[in-house]
Amino acid sequence: MVGEDRILTTHVGSLPRPEALIELLELREKDPGADPARVRAQLRAEVAAVVKRQVELGIDLVSDGEFSKVSYATYVTERLSGFGGESRGHAAADLKAFPDYARKLIEIGGVVPSAGGVCCVGPVAPQSAAALREDLDNFAAALEDARPYGAFMNAASPGVVSVFQKNAFYPDEDAYIEAVAEALRPEYEAIVAAGHLLQIDCPDFAMGRHLAFADLSDEAFVGIVERNVAAVNQATRNIPAEKLRVHLCWGNYEGPHHHDIPLEKIIGAVLKVKARCLLIEGANPRHEHEWKVFEDVRPPPDTIIVPGVIDSTSNYIEHPELVAQRIERYAGVVGRERVMAGADCGFSTFRGLPNVWPDIAWRKLESRVAGARLASARLWGRAPR
């Protein structure tokens, strides 16, 4: 999974969706029976194109862009039973502190996180696997043509499902998380059985603090993280750790983030998750400094740290030299063989609501590849192959 003489590159999963695909998926959402063959053909073609573009750009571990999903967390309501109704969401604590700014964000169509939407109103269980099979088939066809170094596919964590789809059925949150974990297990196992790395998206490990659990102490929230980590481990009990990636973040939106819980407070609980790769934020102004956490906290010997070395909410295109410096900081504390270059979060976590203009997102990814090559040359004392 790590290169012998270079820093590998990857990203978090979601990539900018073409406008034509967004329109088709919105049509399918409003009317599932509307020209399904056309939608399937367009989706398959766009997945092939985005995989090819990643490979041509020099990205080593690629995804399908999460092109078929409404969002990384709410797509599960289409694949699992038990969801309906509606709950009022919690506003993020940092945006509540600046209500005028939050209102302005809403006015201009910006991303404003809210832990609300449909609820759990019945037993959670797998429904039809047709959507997952379509995703796997489209990805397989794209990979056959593009032949990247490696591939991963995203899936939601049990904890993030509970953040955005509130429990109105199970006797307590523990029972709800347990049921969701078991319901997601077949999807997790199917992704790995298809030959891909499985990335479980776990913003509940960090963003959950200021979005859903702002009334708790930091210590109590760490207990929530430990429970959610245990749920991930239980749901992946049949999957080898080397096939697993876990991503955590503090929310992919352009807010003040001054209520983000520090990485140092949650890292002990997070490192108990059974996953070879840990993807974290490392480029934005609130978390770039946290590479220093690993001076005091030593990850397990086989853990690969994948810091974001490009920001996913800013339209600045990072200079390759800055990218290289960010990579080298992590390499200096955990070792060059245990670092991979990532991004802070996805570039289209909610369909049609990009923080970064699509053309700029691709240029940022290109600059990240160039920065990884610079860092590789310096870390290994020679130009990478």
Image (tube, helix red, strand yellow):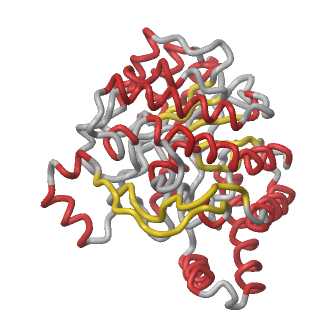
Task: Give the vertical position of 51 relative to 189 (above or below).
Answer: below
Identity of the residue drawn at 52% across and 30% down: 227
Q: Split into 4 quadrants, where in the image is the C terminus?
A: top right
Q: Is residue 81 left or right of residue 264?
A: right
Instruction: Name the residue nearer the viewer: 338 or 349.
Output: 349
Q: Quadrant of residue 315?
A: bottom left
Q: Split into 4 quadrants, where in the image is the N terminus?
A: top right
Res 339 seen here? yes
Q: Is residue 322 left or right of residue 327?
A: left
Disc tally is 0
Q: Position of residue 289 (x, y in %)?
A: 34, 26
Identity of the residue drawn at 77% across and 49% down: 186
Q: Position of residue 72 (x, y in %)?
A: 55, 56
Q: Is residue 107 left or right of residue 191?
A: left
Instruction: Name the residue nearer the viewer: 293 or 212.
Output: 212
Q: Quadrant of residue 104?
A: bottom left
Q: Position of residue 90 (x, y in %)?
A: 31, 54
Identity of the residue drawn at 47% across and 71% down: 352
Res 383 seen here? no
Identity of the residue drawn at 40% across and 50% down: 252
Q: Is residue 261 left or right of residue 39?
A: left
Task: Give the vertical position of 246 relative to 88 (above or below).
Answer: above
Q: Position of residue 271 (x, y in %)?
A: 55, 21
Q: Residue furthest bottom?
A: 34
Task: Give the vertical position of 37 relative to 83 (above or below).
Answer: below
Q: Residue furthest front?
A: 171
